[in-house]
Image (cartoon, rainbow, N blue to C red):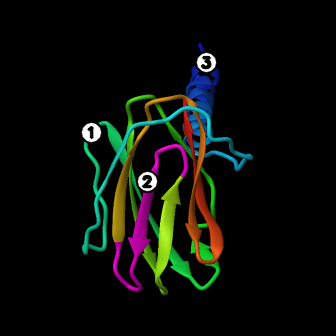
Amino acid sequence: MLRLPRARTGLRLTVAALGLAVVAACGGSTPSSDSGTPAASASTSPSTGASAGATGRALTVTVTGKQVTPAPATVDLAVGETLTLTVTSDHDDQLHAHGFEIERDVKAGVPTTVVLKGAEPGLYDVEMHHPELKLLSVAVR
């Protein structure tokens, strides 16, 4: 009566489940298109962090010159899910969330927060205009 194979199987299943969770949480960058018109609300906030409710996610992005931190990536949202995005830049600029029809002025050093709600499936870019910098893509699925 050996229990070792059963223990190894349980460990393998745990490792596999963790691996799938990591893969599901990460996304790659792909070209975007402005199909559909997801609903959105936006606000400007002087706070340095962003928080979201139980059906949402939060992301903070910093722009220093032409450097975007974290590096641009794709954020997956389910239809109906929200992304609270807080952007802080070292220079005055304009934030544009394509497909969500949001444009906000960003003042140097002042965090600007917008809430994007995934309404229509599609891939949408969020960028700054001066200079043109891609901050992230939002994949609504």
Indicate left or right for 125 with 53 as reference.
Answer: right
Residues packed near mark 3 inside 10 Å, few (<14), some (14 to 19) or many (20 plus): few
Residue found at x 46% / y 36% = 38
Q: Quadrant of residue 21?
A: top right
Looking at the image, which is closer to me, 56 or 32? 32
Tag shown at residue 102: 2
Position above or below: 40 against 130? above
Q: Earlier in the sequence, mark 2 or mark 3?
A: 3
- The amino acid beneath tag 2 is Ile
The CA span between labels 2 and 1 is 23 Å
Q: Which is nearer the N-term, disc 3 or disc 1? A: 3
| Residue 2: image tag | 3
State how far apart marks 2 and 3 are (Cα).
62 Å
* Rendered location of residue 24, percent (x, y): 58, 37
Nearer the observer: mark 2 or 1; the answer is: 2
Q: Nearer the viewer, residue 93 or 138?
A: 93
Give the residue at x 63% y 30%: 12
Q: Is residue 108 magenta?
A: yes
> Amino acid under label 1?
Ala
